[in-house]
Image (spheres, rainbow, N blue to C red):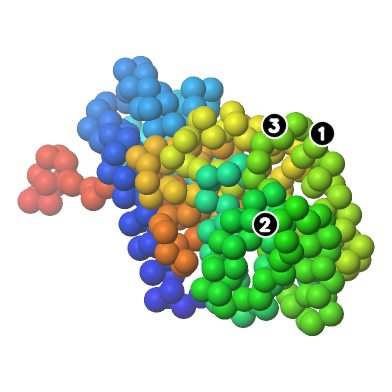
């Protein structure tokens, strides 16, 4: 990535997180930089993290870790405590594994309930990987709703990638089988597949997605498989509780968090990671087709808790004069 591309990505992230950065997390920055480090500070910080949608248990744990770091490293200033909290959050949300896209083709199943931005996420993923030089094919595996395939077809045209689809009520596993087999035969690098977003019982969901996974292997024994769960950041903690069963049933391997630009509670990224135990892979920061970003824990933590310009203390000013 060129320096210019890196700058554009950072600017897009900062713009997308503006509501969060200037809302609850600005209060956190102000609290840390304008107060002395004492029990009142920790109590205020805990409350603000909860308001930012980090989640109560996670907020308590982060503040306890900050308290321990302050004591162990003998931190004295609010700026030092802010830097320590930024690093704690970075470690908290850092993925421990990379996505497995080594297959021929690499298959990404996109799952999630209706209304979270699943179809547009698929189009954005297609655009993102096409820009990286990958040959991408889409599969309309949500055959439960005719409108889902039609919407995906529109997005496929915008992203300029082929789409494999079938009629309403068709077997989703068969549609995805055809797409993977076609992609393998034609030398495509990647298949990104939609799945039904309806909430059905856990066994039904597991059976359907297990069947799809088997169809991927049958279509191409060399295929790799990732299952990305799409969540809506605006619904925050509610999204987490709604997603837990869905996540377990689907065998999700990673998270896409959409609509972060629409909420001041970007702390849900931290809460989602803790509650679901899955890496955040992508974040959505706008409605345009290029508004999906690879998730970087470092960039995200720095955007949430930016460094504050340091001002000289009165003592330092006197030393400069001398």
Q: Nearer the viewer, mark 3 or mark 2?
A: 2
In the image shown, does 245 or 269 lie closer to the viewer?
245
- Image location of residue 225, percent across then percent down: 78, 58
Residue 254 in sight: no
Residue 142 horizontal side relative to residue 274, left or right: right
Q: Is residue 14 above or below residue 204?
A: below
- Residue beneath disc 1: 203
- Image location of residue 204, percent across then percent down: 80, 37
Residue depicted at x 64% and y 45%: 197
Secondary structure under tag 3 reads helix
Residue depicted at x 77% and y 32%: 202
Q: Residues within 10 Å of mark 2 (few under 14, many from 20)?
A: many
Q: Is residue 249 above or below residue 257?
A: above
Residue depicted at x 62% and y 35%: 243
- Residue beneath disc 3: 245
Q: How much space separates mark 1 and mark 2, taking CA atoms?
A: 19 Å
Among numbered discs 3 and 1, the one appearing first in the sequence: 1
Secondary structure under tag 2 reads strand
Q: How much space separates mark 3 and mark 1, taking CA atoms?
A: 11 Å
**Cβ–Cβ below 8 Å for labels 3 and 2?**
no
Residue 141 horizontal side relative to residue 21, left or right: right
In which quarter of the view is residue 164 placed?
bottom right
Q: Residue reaching furthest bottom?
A: 186
């Amino acid at each position: 990535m060129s320096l210019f591309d890196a700058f554009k990505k950072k600017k897009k992230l900062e713009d997308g997180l503006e509501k969060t950065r200037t809302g609850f997390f600005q209060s956190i920055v102000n609290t840390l930089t304008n107060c002395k480090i004492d029990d009142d500070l920790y109590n205020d910080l805990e409350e603000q993290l909860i308001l930012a949608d980090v989640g109560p248990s996670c907020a308590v744990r982060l503040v306890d870790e900050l308290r321990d770091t302050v004591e162990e490293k003998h931190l004295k200033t609010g700026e030092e405590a802010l830097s320590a909290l930024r690093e704690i959050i970075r470690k908290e949300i850092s993925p421990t594994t990379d996505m497995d896209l080594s297959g021929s083709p690499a298959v990404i199943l996109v799952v999630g309930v209706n209304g979270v931005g699943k179809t547009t996420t698929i189009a954005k993923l297609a655009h993102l990987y096409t820009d990286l030089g990958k040959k991408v094919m889409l599969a309309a595996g949500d055959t439960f709703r005719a409108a889902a395939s039609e919407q995906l077809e529109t997005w496929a045209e915008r992203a300029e990638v082929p789409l494999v689809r079938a009629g309403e009520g068709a077997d989703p596993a068969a549609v995805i089988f055809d797409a993977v087999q076609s992609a393998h035969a034609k030398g495509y690098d990647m298949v990104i597949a939609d799945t039904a977003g309806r909430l059905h019982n856990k066994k039904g969901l597991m059976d359907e997605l297990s069947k799809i996974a088997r169809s991927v292997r049958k279509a191409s024994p060399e295929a790799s498989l990732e299952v990305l769960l799409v969540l809506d950041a605006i619904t925050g903690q509610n999204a987490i509780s709604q997603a837990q069963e869905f996540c377990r049933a689907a065998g999700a391997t990673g998270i896409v968090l959409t609509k972060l630009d629409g909420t001041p509670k970007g702390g849900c990224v931290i809460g989602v990671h803790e509650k679901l135990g899955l890496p955040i892979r992508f974040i959505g920061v706008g409605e345009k087709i290029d508004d999906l970003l690879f998730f970087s824990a470092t960039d995200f933590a720095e955007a949430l808790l930016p460094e504050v310009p340091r001002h000289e203390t009165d003592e330092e000013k006197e030393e400069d004069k001398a």
